[in-house]
Image (cartoon, coloured by chain):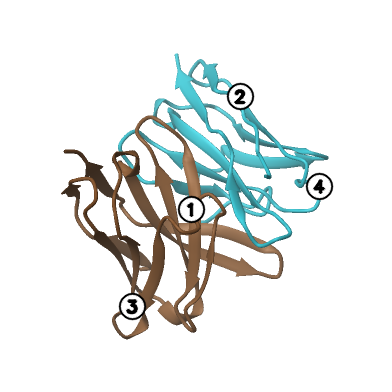
Chain colours: A brown, B cyan
Amino acid sequence: EVQLVQSGAEVKKPGESLNISCKGSGYSFTSYWIGWVRQMPGKGLEWMGIIYPGDSDTRYSPSFQGQVTISADKSISTAYLQWSSLKASDTAMYYCARLTAVAGFHWFDPWGQGTLVTVSS
Amino acid sequence: SYELTQPPSVSVSPGQTARITCSGDALPKQYAYWYQQRPGQAPVLVIYKDSERPSGIPERFSGSSSGTTVTLTISGVQAEDEADYYCQSADSNGTYVFGTGTKVTVL
């Protein structure tokens, strides 16, 4: 079974750093892109960026470029989403999802269970 | 930036048909995908490549495309279909976008 398992909920203060993870299993981790998606409280889905663990090729949404860092460690089939200095506005649920991107087809499936990040002083 | 527009809400009685539209200028050139997000859960893919249904998704879910609009149709709506639904596509620059989302309420 293809599965993405994310790290647990986090409560942080403004200005702190954070690293959340997404571990893939049941498929060749280096052969598919992994995407990150933000969902702020009561709001819709926002695409943040993607990484190809095979060669660490990374692409960001213009809205998130410079705000977060996406990385991956293919030796342990894990992708990461990192912040160097959190803001209260980073409070949201964050999802990872496997991206199938083949010959003009691009879809996210499956999704991780989500990681809730709360930033509050 | 590229946008996909959906109606904020759709209400439907059990057994009736719900139709959710998604409009975007690039849709004639790019496929659309649909996700269901039940309260407190992660999104689940229900339609890919405009009209294909993944294994395990009930046959009452179908998709269609016409010009700049794609449509998700839920035939014979059941109480368990009450959820938020999002369309998604890609643009020619290799970036991705989700629609604004539609809340389906089963009366």
Could you tell me which chain the residue with mark 3 belongs to? Answer: A
Q: Which mark is residue A64?
A: 1
Q: Could you tell me residue B65's position as x and y percent? A: 76, 41
The amino acid type of the residue labelled 3 equals Ser
**Dot 1, crowdedness within 10 Å: few (<14), some or many (≥20)?**
few
Q: CA distance from mark 1 to mark 3?
A: 24 Å
Q: Which residue is mark 4?
A: B28
Q: Could you tell me residue B64's position as x and y percent? A: 72, 41
Q: CA distance from mark 1 to mark 4?
A: 27 Å
Q: Which residue is mark 2?
A: B7
Could you tell me which chain the residue with mark 4 belongs to? Answer: B
Q: Are marks 3 and 2 on the same chain?
A: no
Quarter residue A107 falls in: bottom right
B82 or B26, which is in the foreground?
B26
Q: Could you tell me residue B44's position as x and y percent? A: 44, 48
Q: Which residue is mark 3?
A: A77
The tally of labels here is 4
A36 on left or right of A17: right
Q: Residue at x 67, y 44 (%)?
A: B1
Under circle 2, the secondary element is loop
Q: Is residue B61 above or below residue B31?
A: above
Could you tell me which chain the residue with mark 1 belongs to? Answer: A
